[in-house]
């Protein structure tokens, strides 16, 4: 047992070390799925449409195979098991809520011990509704699945676990309503009591309810996989019953069920796939939850940006395991959406049907890490999502086109939301280098890229200059500020976690930029292509000389076409705009340009791909431009000019620049 624990600990530390070595170049610690996502934000820019090359069925099978291998790798290397500290994240802190949740857990367990008054409902007509006696019977049946009878299939477990979850929801709603009614009666009897005191004593928890369909392909998935049991968050006003039409955009968590207790690895792998789709479909998700049910053993999983925390097994066939599981559901119910992983600075406007995003501008070089909301907070209304966070790990970058809410101006801006690895880590920790681990110290020394800081520097240095090109301007930038004036970062979220294995520190940041451009594939002809690329590289050269910043990621996705700026058409047919300064570094710092791989595979220089020790220079970026021109000339400069991969051998050969090992790609070039 001790050897097994030591082996798992060594594996976790080895995996952590791999992540740490990649801090200075996040690209190197990306999974292959993340790399593909980075390169194919808009696949039509780089390769012909999939309908030309492969049919939809083949594409789906290919995606499933790739995702399966990726998920199995993550399940083997990136899960911290037996991490019961995840329960601390959702444990109530207010004495009133603690007392009420304890009473709900006690009442639920007491009811389960009792025999049902009848055999319960369960006809085809009412199976989705809640029946108290049937729920108790289902809980007894579920607890008696140890050892697992041979005639019980995985699908037989779905209705049993769903009934147990609805039983807990029934007691949550019953107790919460009783509490609120008692508060209202006391308020009516004491007229001198302030209304604010009455309101603060009222509780409005969620109820966790399962969706009706099980073993079902939800809307929003891109891999065609079926979800076993999906859970959603609903108000106390909802009827306690299974909800209809599960979609990834609505799910709170997913349960992956297996017959055998020894099948936890496979359950983890499938849950990883599902959670990836939750991130892709939910703009407000900061981190995510999930559960595995293997036999009678339940594990709670917390997904965050660089690894997964899994609790120890809760064996619901035992009193202690059942109590832990019921407590988990009750605590989830009374958690605020912020602690459940949702972003409170994003909200759907029911009247307009649009997502609204609150952006905070800090105004100075040192972005605020803790302050109250102020008049500098600006609300934007999203007009179009550009990029979703479909990778399981990493920055979870999301981009939107948006307009300022309530403004008469119709000009759009780009909002970029991401979880970055900051240069200075945090004000408190960076001030004491002795308290930092090796990675954090090296990250400060490396002067790691910070796009918000880079854009502020560009705006300051180029302001007032007569320029023939456009450059990105940051209208606001800084840390995302949560309720209570606390900056959103992984240290704040996981302050409960005293695990000695250190995790990467990430900060939730948001940048509002202009002007808005269009993909390079929207050029009409070769002349527009040359003009756009020339402008972008003139911008690159000016920023290098005036701001002393090296871009380090010249690629087809990072050069945009602008036809209109500030409500007016540009003087020429098009202007080019160079964007994405995530990887840009100062060339004046002693460690800048260090030998770390960065960029997008088809366009990275041979020097960069080979990982040579010497510094990166502007020549690497100009070499990337050469590959960009070759790439577009090979595949076609716009959609009307696309080449057929199967019919053109040259096109097929060029794809080797995108797939495979970096050294192999360098040799191909």
Image (spheres, rainbow, N blue to C red):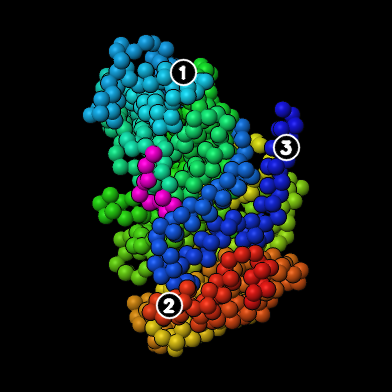
Quadrant of the rendering where the N terminus is positioned = top right
Q: Quadrant of the C terminus?
A: bottom right
Q: Which badge, 2 or 1, is on the more N-terminal residue?
A: 1
Q: Is label 2 in contact with label 3 (beta carbons under 8 Å)?
A: no
Q: 430 or 353, which is in the foreground?
A: 353
Q: Distance between the residues labelled 1 and 3?
A: 33 Å
Mark 2 vs mark 3, CA separation in Å: 51 Å
* Near-viewer residue (567 or 490): 490
Checking the image for residue 144, the label placed there is 1
Q: Earlier in the sequence, mark 1 or mark 3?
A: 3
Q: Which residue, given by chain and number where applicable, does mark 3 sit on?
A: 7
Local crowd at mark 2 within 10 Å, few (<14), some, or many (≥20)? Answer: many
**Residue drawn 58% across and 57% down?**
32
- Residue 39 among magenta residues: no
Vertical arrangement, residue 410 with respect to residue 372, above or below: below
Please tell me the numbered disc located at residue 642: 2
Which residue occupies the foreground of this view, 299 or 468?
299
Q: Please give the name of the residue rendered at 49% of the width and 67% of the height, measured from the top-left corner.
A: 474
Q: Is mark 2 on a helix, strand or loop?
A: loop
The magenta stretch spans which residues?
Answer: 215-224
């Amino acid at each position: 047992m001790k050897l097994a624990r030591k082996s798992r600990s060594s594996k976790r530390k080895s995996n952590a070390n791999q992540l740490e070595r990649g801090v200075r170049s996040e690209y190197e610690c990306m999974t292959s799925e993340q790399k593909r996502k980075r390169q194919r934000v808009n696949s039509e820019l780089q390769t012909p449409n999939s309908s030309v090359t492969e049919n939809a069925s083949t594409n789906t099978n290919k995606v499933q195979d790739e995702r399966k291998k990726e998920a199995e790798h993550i399940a083997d290397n990136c899960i911290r098991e037996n991490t019961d500290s995840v329960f601390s994240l959702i444990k109530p802190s207010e004495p009133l809520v603690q007392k009420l949740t304890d009473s709900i857990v006690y009442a639920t367990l007491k009811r389960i011990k009792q025999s049902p008054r009848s055999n319960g409902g369960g006809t085809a007509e009412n199976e989705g509704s809640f029946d108290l006696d049937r729920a108790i019977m289902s809980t007894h049946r579920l607890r008696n699945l140890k050892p697992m009878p041979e005639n019980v299939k995985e699908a037989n477990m779905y209705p049993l676990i769903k009934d147990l979850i609805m039983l807990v929801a029934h007691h949550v709603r019953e107790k919460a309503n009783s509490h609120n009614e008692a508060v209202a009666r006391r308020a009516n009897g004491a007229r001198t009591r302030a209304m604010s005191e009455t309101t603060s004593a009222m509780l409005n928890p969620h109820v966790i309810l399962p969706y009706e369909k099980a073993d079902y392909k939800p809307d929003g998935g891109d891999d065609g996989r079926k979800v076993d049991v999906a859970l959603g968050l609903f108000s106390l006003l909802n009827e306690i019953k299974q909800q209809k039409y599960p979609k990834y955009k609505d799910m709170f968590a997913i349960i992956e069920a297996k017959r055998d207790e020894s099948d936890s690895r496979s359950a983890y792998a499938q849950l990883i796939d599902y959670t990836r789709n939750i991130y892709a479909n939910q703009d407000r998700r900061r981190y995510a939850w999930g559960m595995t049910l293997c036999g009678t053993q339940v594990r709670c999983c917390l997904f965050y940006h660089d690894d997964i925390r899994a609790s120890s097994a809760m064996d619901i066939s035992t009193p202690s395991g059942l109590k832990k599981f019921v407590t988990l559901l009750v605590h989830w119910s009374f958690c605020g959406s912020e602690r459940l992983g949702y972003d409170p600075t994003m909200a759907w406007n029911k009247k307009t049907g649009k997502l609204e995003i609150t952006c905070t501008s800090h105004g100075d070089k040192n972005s605020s890490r803790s302050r109250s909301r102020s008049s500098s907070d600006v609300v934007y209304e999203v007009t179009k999502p550009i990029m979703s966070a479909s990778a399981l790990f990493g920055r979870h970058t999301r981009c939107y086109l948006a307009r300022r809410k309530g403004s008469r101006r119709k000009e759009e801006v780009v909002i970029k939301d991401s979880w970055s690895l900051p240069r200075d880590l945090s004000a408190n920790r960076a001030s004491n280098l002795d308290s930092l681990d090796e990675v954090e110290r090296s990250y400060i020394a490396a002067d790691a890229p910070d796009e918000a800081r880079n854009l502020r520097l560009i705006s300051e240095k180029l302001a007032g200059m007569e320029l023939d090109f456009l450059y990105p301007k940051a209208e606001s930038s800084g840390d995302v500020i949560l309720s209570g004036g606390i900056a959103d970062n992984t240290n704040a979220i996981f302050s409960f976690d005293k695990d000695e294995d250190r995790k990467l520190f990430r900060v939730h940041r948001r940048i509002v930029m202009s002007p808005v451009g269009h993909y390079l594939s929207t050029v009409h002809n070769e002349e527009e292509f040359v003009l756009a690329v020339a402008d972008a590289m003139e911008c690159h050269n000016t920023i290098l000389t005036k701001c002393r910043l090296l871009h380090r990621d010249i690629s087809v996705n990072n050069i945009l076409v602008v036809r209109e700026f500030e409500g007016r058409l540009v003087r020429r047919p098009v202007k080019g705009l160079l964007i994405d300064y995530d990887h840009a570094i100062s060339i004046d710092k002693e460690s800048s340009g260090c030998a770390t791989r960065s960029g997008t595979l088809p366009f990275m220089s041979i020097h960069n791909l080979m990982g040579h020790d010497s510094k990166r220079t502007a020549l690497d970026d100009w070499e990337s431009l050469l590959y960009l021109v070759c790439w577009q000339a090979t595949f076609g400069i716009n959609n009307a000019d696309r080449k057929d991969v199967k019919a053109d051998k040259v096109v097929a050969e060029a794809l080797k620049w995108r797939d495979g090992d970096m050294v192999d790609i360098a040799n191909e070039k």
